[in-house]
Image (cartoon, grey):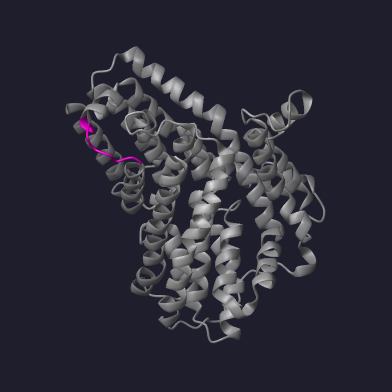
Amino acid sequence: MTTLLFLLLVITFILIAIIRYEIHPFLALFGGAIGYGLLVGMDLKMILQSITEGFGGVMGNVGLLILFGVILGTFLEKTGGAMVIAEKVLSWVGEKSINLSLMLSGWVLSIPVFGDSTILMMNPIAKSLSAKSTVSYAATIVAVSLGAMASHSLIPPTPGPIATAGILGADLGQVILYGTIVSLIALIPVYFFVQKWVTKISVRPQENPQDQYILPEERPKLATSLLPILTPLGLIFLASIASYPSKPFGEGTLPEALIFLGSPIIALLIGALLSFALPKKLDRKLLSATGWIGEALVAAAPVIFITGAGAVFGKMLQNSGIGTVVTDSLQGANWGLFLPFLLAFGLKCAQGSTTVAMITTASIVAPLLGPLGLDTDMLKVFATIAIGSGALAISHANDSAFWVVTQLSGMSTKQGNLSHSLGTLITSFSAMAVLYLISLVMA
């Protein structure tokens, strides 16, 4: 019981450090991990071992994945390739279904691109469609934001799901597959929420000369824009199939090549390299420390180091023997997938960052997979998605996405809470409900 109290104390310390004193999550997590080890009386050599094993282990598995994913997203954003994909989705669904079109566009774009960036990129389209119709600007931009939040939390290669899958040891191909299914089904009630509720919030777009819009002739073609996204996803899926015990591709060179090319690091490296074809002219400066690659490294570094610190925390928990403590505490209780969900939900509400909530929750849950009955390959995948579902909500005043939505649209804080914040809550519960129903059939 003392061990659990120390864990609660350390988690409280981490949250206060991040929220109240605005200490970087890396320092808060790293300091909290060491503090926990000292509090529970771990041997000093074991504390050092937990640091090196935790940080080094996750860097080898996850660090490069995050970096390649950010590089891919940066090139899509900077060249206008993301906008090409968005406008194609709009043309497929049709402008008569404006909110559905924008929601699906936000969902697609936020798979490779950060959620905030997706909202910023889609804002000119959301604004213009609202101006050309009677649809409220609040509805068009919230449709984008909720679509973006769903895939941002549930589908790799965005950093949160990649890091969570890496920490829990979940198969990335399966996370992509089930994350896609869960997020799309979860958006069904969200769409009706936007249509029936958010459209009643009367907000009209105002012209802003600072709105940035990449001209159509300067953008890459649709096929070129889709290639960096679809190629790694396809390779990861093929590798997952090639790894099945039934050996559907037989034995020999072909399955070995597919497994190599579809390993997440190689697949995302290929996706990042393919993104270099997006600019009309690949200037060497784009690949320099001050170019787009430099920007991607700067954007990826905090996420990578937070992930490393979270892994240290997880390894410290594991080596402290907390799994046995939790096993004894949870005897007779059937928390299952709901504990990861509730932990991520609470952490997201408290400190605002989806990625930090997912990484911290995964670090806490990783040594508890056995006691929770989540240690099979499939349940590790479901645990990853449960964490992503919890980290969807609630996006409010401590989340940058909330301010992006409200400041771009001109909504008040109250209007933002009644639209974007409430929408993320519905998305979160909807995703968890879908996941639970799937787990009853598949687990």
Rendering coords of residue 236 (x, y %) = 65, 39
**Residue 357 on the magenta segment:** no
In what quadrant of the picture does the C terminus appear? Answer: top left
Residue occupying the point 43% across, 83% down: 202
| Secondary structure mainly formed by the magenta segment | loop
Residue occupying the point 78% across, 57% down: 223
| Left or right placement of residue 251 versus residue 140 in this view | right
Rendering coords of residue 386 (x, y %) = 41, 46
In the image, residue 214 above or below residue 267: below
The residue most toward the bottom is 134
| Left or right placement of residue 102 versus residue 138 in this view | right
Range drawn in magenta: 329-336
In what quadrant of the picture does the N terminus appear? Answer: top left
Rendering coords of residue 201 (x, y %) = 41, 80
In front of the other: 416 or 443: 443
In the image, residue 129 above or below residue 337: below
Residue occupying the point 41% across, 66% down: 423
| Left or right placement of residue 246 versus residue 383 in this view | right
In the image, residue 209 above or below residue 28: below
| Left or right placement of residue 272 versus residue 29 in this view | right
Rendering coords of residue 154 (x, y %) = 50, 49
Residue occupying the point 74% across, 24% down: 251
| Residue 237, image quadrant | top right
| Residue 172, image quadrant | top right
Q: Is residue 299 visible?
A: no
In front of the other: 83 or 327: 327
Q: Is residue 292 visible?
A: yes
